[in-house]
Amino acid sequence: LAKTTQPISMDSYEGQEVNITCSHNNIATNDYITWYQQFPSQGPRFIIQGYKTKVTNEVASLFIPADRKSSTLSLPRVSLSDTAVYYCLVDTGRRALTFGSGTRLQVQP
Amino acid sequence: DAGVIQSPRHEVTEMGQEVTLRCKPISGHDYLFWYRQTMMRGLELLIYFNNNVPIDDSGMPEDRFSAKMPNASFSTLKIQPSEPRDSAVYFCASSFSSSIPGNTIYFGEGSWLTVV
């Protein structure tokens, strides 16, 4: 099972770009990298998923280098409402996902 | 779609009482998950079902916990008897097996349980 390591917390200011890096050294060939976001008092919500290179959607971008041993979630121009916990997960194809501790992002005005 | 629906949203109960948490997954989803979240242990998978059949219950803490899925649109998580250490947020989630390429799990808003 590929273990993930990400910073416990990060601080940012409104309007800044935030990059959260996750390491997953033991990722397997068929595994996907997935990020979830959890706001206080809510369940986690899927943000983005990728296999390699770069994926972008309306919420974030995900950068994955060629060796796939790490990934970076990029949030452009964060606002106060982006304050949340961000989880990096490796999707092994087993239907149930294992969540780590996540990164607590605090956005200041 | 209304999303995953859980009830009750909040429950306060006394130690020793039976607690039943309910979940309605998203229509058409064939996987259902129960997670528990606490400050100390984070988000833990308790059990999950595929087509109403339990697949992995290795995360269920002990015999006081049981989960059922009598049909595709309903599941329960029961704690009997409840203890203060069971206080947590219990999330139900569902997903669709044919989601490609990866697996997106949709979570409910959680049931906040306090056992006093």
Image (cartoon, coloured by chain):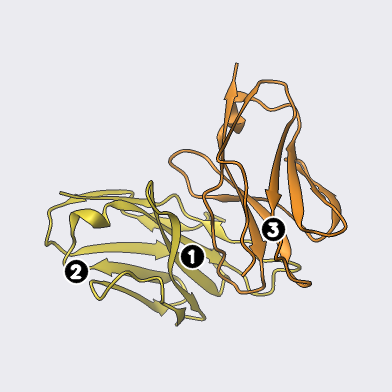
- Taking the spot 76% from the left edge, 31% from the top edge, the residue there is A76
Q: Are marks 1 and 3 on the same chain?
A: no
Residues at marks 2 and 3, CA–CA distance in whole angstroms:
39 Å
Residue A3, image x and y in percent? 61, 61
Q: Are marks 2 and 3 on the same chain?
A: no
Of tags 1 and 3, which is closer to the observer? 3
Residue A22, image x and y in percent? 68, 49
**Label 1: chain?**
B
Residue A36, image x and y in percent? 61, 50
> Three-letter amino acid code at disc 3?
His
Give the left or right position of residue A64, taking residue B47 as reference.
right
Q: Secondary structure at mark 2?
A: loop
Of tags 1 and 2, which is closer to the observer? 2
Q: Which residue is mark 3?
A: A24
Q: Are marks 1 and 2 on the same chain?
A: yes
- Using the image, tell me which numbered label, if any, was put on residue B25: 1
Q: Secondary structure at mark 1?
A: loop
Q: Secondary structure at mark 3?
A: loop
> Three-letter amino acid code at disc 1?
Pro
> Three-letter amino acid code at disc 2?
Gln
Residue B43, image x and y in percent? 45, 55
- Using the image, tell me which numbered label, if any, was put on residue B80: 2
Give the left or right position of residue B109, taking residue A59 as reference.
left
Mark 2 closeness class: few <14, some 14–19, many ≥20 residues within 10 Å? some
- Taking the spot 52% from the left edge, 54% from the top edge, the residue there is B2
Give the tally of numbered discs. Answer: 3
User: Measured along the vertical axis of the image, is residue B65 above or below residue B38?
Assistant: below
Label the orange chain with its letter. Answer: A
- Using the image, tell me which numbered label, if any, was put on residue B82: none
Give the left or right position of residue B85, taking residue B52 as reference.
left
Of tags 2 and 3, which is closer to the observer? 3
Label the yellow chain with its letter. Answer: B
